[in-house]
Image: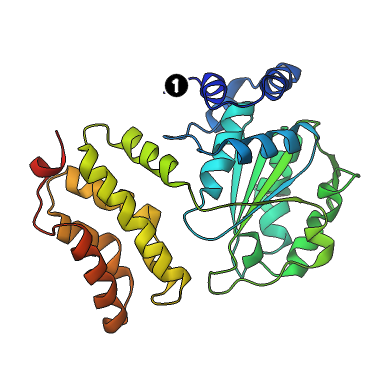
Amino acid sequence: MQDILEFLRQEGIEKELIDGIRAFRQEAPVTGELKRRIPAPEVYYLGTGIWEKAIAAILCRKNLLLAGPKATGKNILAESLGAAFERPAWNVSFHIGADAAYLVGTDTFDGNQVTFRQGPVTLCAENGGFGILDEINMARNEAMAVLHSALDFRRELDVPGYHLVEMQPQTRYIATMNYGYAGTRELNEALASRFVVLDMPIIAEADLDRLIASRFPDLKAELRSQFTSLFYELDRKARSAEVSEKASDLRGLLDAIDLCHRGLRTGDALAMCISDKTFDPYEKQLIQDVIDERIDPDLSGSDLFA
């Protein structure tokens, strides 16, 4: 995998920001078992403007909220930032049942005594890590109140029965959210005001072409272009409410190409990874018609890859 700082230089990121990352790394190098927690993404986020905003926010000790619809690379950016700054990452997947104990920790039995088992937010704070709070608007606002003191100027967690956890200077929290998912809710003002918000755009067409080329270097150029066009055609139909947002599925598109690489026909692969994720028969047929019009369903791996 290409060195991420060299990647950022090639992407045209300002030298001052790259120098800031180097200085950040030298403040408290990660050692021992924590090195295993430093993210190593298969691909880096593509998008110079978003990179520069995110790097500047982290260097200024801000916590980031990555807001945007599907296929905008929120988690890829979060992992890429962890890799760039060489910080251990703790991933927290939010759900309706998430509570303070899930985030901060809880009492548990250890032999004959009760001990405090730290949660991911506490471990992240004590070890100067990056806490990736995935789909933060899935949790109840009252559960998130425990994070307020960690996210504002106090930068500490007062855990009852444990002790006052002071965050290491390198600690950052990077939250992601998608208003389109079922079960999500509005963030209350107290929580939202503790983040700087990055509005994540849909990946640019040229960047998507580069992404597919990096994942599948042997995919023929003309077919790579067809897959790219298919994604944007489905995305346009989702945005105009002709089909649901399930059709605009970048993960599904990449998974379909991966299945084709293993020898599955394009029609079967795209059905499994995109159209069959919609369970309404009428909508499924609409999506399938768009796919079949753009991509020949009978292509095999030898037709797609050089």
- Front residue of 162/248: it is 248
Q: Position of residue 190 (x, y in %)?
A: 84, 62
Above or below: residue 55 compared with residue 30: below
Write the residue at 64% across / 27% down.
85
Query: Which quadrant does the N terminus fall into?
Result: top left
Q: Position of residue 77 (x, y in %)?
A: 56, 41
Write the residue at 59% across / 42% down.
78
Is 252 positioned to the left or the right of 264 in the image? Answer: right
Above or below: residue 92 compared with residue 280: above
Q: Please identify the quarter of the rendering in which residue 143 is found.
A: bottom right
Q: Please identify the quarter of the rendering in which residue 178 is found.
A: bottom right
Is 223 positioned to the left or the right of 27 in the image? Answer: left
Coloring basis for residues:
rainbow
Specify the farthest residue to the right.
154
Q: Residues within 10 Å of mark 1 (few under 14, many from 20)?
A: few
- Front residue of 120/299: it is 299
Query: Which quadrant does the C terminus fall into?
Result: top left
Q: Which residue is mark 1?
A: 2
Above or below: residue 195 compared with residue 31: below
- Front residue of 172/297: it is 297
Q: Amino acid at mark 1?
A: Gln
- Front residue of 101/138: it is 138
User: Does residue 235 appear anywhere in the picture?
Assistant: yes
Q: Position of residue 301 (x, y in %)?
A: 12, 44
